[in-house]
Image (spheres, rainbow, N blue to C red):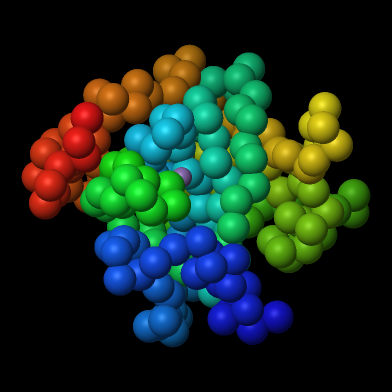
Amino acid sequence: MSEKDRLRTYRGKRNFDTTGEPSGDHATERDDDEPVFVVQIHDASTMHFDFRLEVDGVLKSWSIPKGPSTDPHDKRLAIPTEDHPLEYRDFEGVIPHDEYGGGTVIVWDQGTYRPASHDKRDRPVPFDEALENGHATFDLHGEKLHGRYALTRFKGHDEKPTWLLVRTGSGGSGGSPDPRRARSARSGRTLRQVAEESDGGAGT
Ligand code: MN
């Protein structure tokens, strides 16, 4: 599937005359050897974290209501959402209220990751294949998140596939950040500060 096709759902949900989110039309070739990840905090109709991993030129995305945890005992529900354009990793600001996902977004963490999935004979599994198989492990090198995490697919009670994000190996006990106090890795700002500094504010 071409990059454009993969972003059709993303584009179909948004009016780029109104929202400041990137359209993904100006995709740039990246030659960095390590793929990127980003975790955004999104104060939409319900507060959540958006976890995104670069795979094949797009950001594979999951909505995580409670946010990623550094505690290996925490299993975090991760609901798959539409692929986002790579440029989305820089997006921080306010999405207008009448738009899809209306609310404030900050970049809570950003960095690179290294795929770490292996098969039974300990051979590396390509990351897209690991995701397709429903189990992918990776090492995050972020400003806040470090170390190995795993995403595992399962069938929820309504038979819809959903995922769990878990810190594997030795983690910490810090749990997840309080989204209202958390600060942007890009600008040091809180959700409230971004909302207040945006034209028109968030209205709440
Ligand atoms: Mn979101």
Q: Residue at position x 32%, y 46% from top? A: 97
Q: Answer above or below: position of 54 versus 78.
A: below
Q: Residue at position x 68%, y 34% from top? A: 164
Left or right: 202, with 105 as reference point = left
**Furthest-front residue in this view:** 98
Quarter occupied by the N terminus: bottom right
Q: Position of residue 134 (x, y in %)?
A: 79, 48
Left or right: 146, with 58 as reference point = left
Name the image quarter holding residue 126.
bottom right
Q: Answer above or below: position of 133 versus 39.
A: below
Q: Position of residue 173 (x, y in %)?
A: 48, 15
Q: Residue at position x 50%, y 45% from top? A: 51
Q: Residue at position x 45%, y 30% from top? A: 46
**How many numbered marks does the figure carry?**
0
Name the image quarter holding residue 158.
top right
Q: Position of residue 8 (x, y in %)?
A: 58, 73
Is residue 4 visible in this depiction of the protein?
A: yes
Quarter occupied by the C terminus: top left
197 or 149, nearer to the observer: 197
Q: Position of residue 132 (x, y in %)?
A: 79, 58
Left or right: 185, with 41 as reference point = left
156 or 143, nearer to the observer: 156
Q: Answer above or below: position of 93 versus 147.
A: below
37 or 26, nearer to the observer: 26
Name the image quarter holding residue 182.
top left
Left or right: 59, with 117 as reference point = left
Is residue 109 visible in this depiction of the protein?
A: no
